[in-house]
Image (spheres, coloured by chain):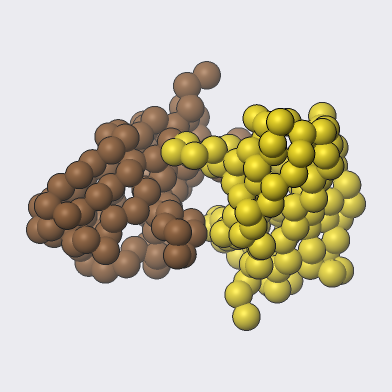
Amino acid sequence: QKEVEQDPGPLSVPEGAIVSLNCTYSNSAFQYFMWYRQYSRKGPELLMYTYSSGNKEDGRFTAQVDKSSKYISLFIRDSQPSDSATYLCAFYSNSGYALNFGKGTSLLVTP
Amino acid sequence: DAGVIQSPRHEVTEMGQEVTLRCKPISGHDYLFWYRQTMMRGLELLIYFNNNVPIDDSGMPEDRFSAKMPNASFSTLKIQPSEPRDSAVYFCASSGGVGGYQPQHFGDGTRLSIL
């Protein structure tokens, strides 16, 4: 079983839609949770960072963590064409400083 | 503030040649990471440094790969000799701040093609 599972997509939605992106993980030692956005030919850019179960909101983005189910989500409200990118979930375990990444979900927001 | 700076942005070279990738981390960050990204395997950690000292190099694929961090503002990843299967995008990232497990900030990568 892979440590991190993330649907690669592509996910295509119309502008203004609510987008839900998800990752599941198997390692109970994962304690810190991140979402990165990666545009084509660019490096991953940090969007959200949290270490507790529950919701964290930042503008149009909401990160949700459910440690008991080992499941994290990223919601994007009022999606824009500029949100078209690949979204990667990432995790720190409490045993080191290596980030464990999902393979990313490709999102396309159409005007 | 300047982010993580990598050079070159693109590198095309022939099999067997030596390749050197360079990274300047964000000033004040004490952790530096080298990743490789491919379609098949996603982002993989190769090696990371803390205060210029290599901490974990278990992700380095073989002895052909080596990394150094001679000072807090510069790191290199070297491949010698290069092979076509080394073709990938190589990212450098840095992190730092009070407390552990700070988020990592990435450069825009070096796109490496080995012919």
| Chain coloured brown here | B
Residue shown at 69% from the left, 38% from the top: A109
- Residue B36 drawn at (x, y percent): 40, 54
A64 or B54, which is in the foreground? Answer: A64
User: Residue furthest toward the right?
Assistant: A54
B91 or A53, which is in the foreground? Answer: B91
Residue shown at 12% from the left, 52% from the top: B14
Task: Please give left or right for residue B96 compared with residue B113 in the image.
Answer: right
Residue shown at 80% from the left, 50% from the top: A20
- Residue A84 drawn at (x, y percent): 63, 38
The quadrant holding residue B66 is bottom left
Q: Is residue B73 above or below residue A97?
A: above
Q: Is residue A59 above or below residue B41?
A: above
| Residue B80 in sight | no
Chain A colour in the picture: yellow
| Residue A108 in sight | yes
Q: Is residue A84 above or below residue A98?
A: above
Task: Please give left or right for residue B25 compared with residue A19 in the image.
Answer: left
A15 or B44, which is in the foreground? Answer: A15
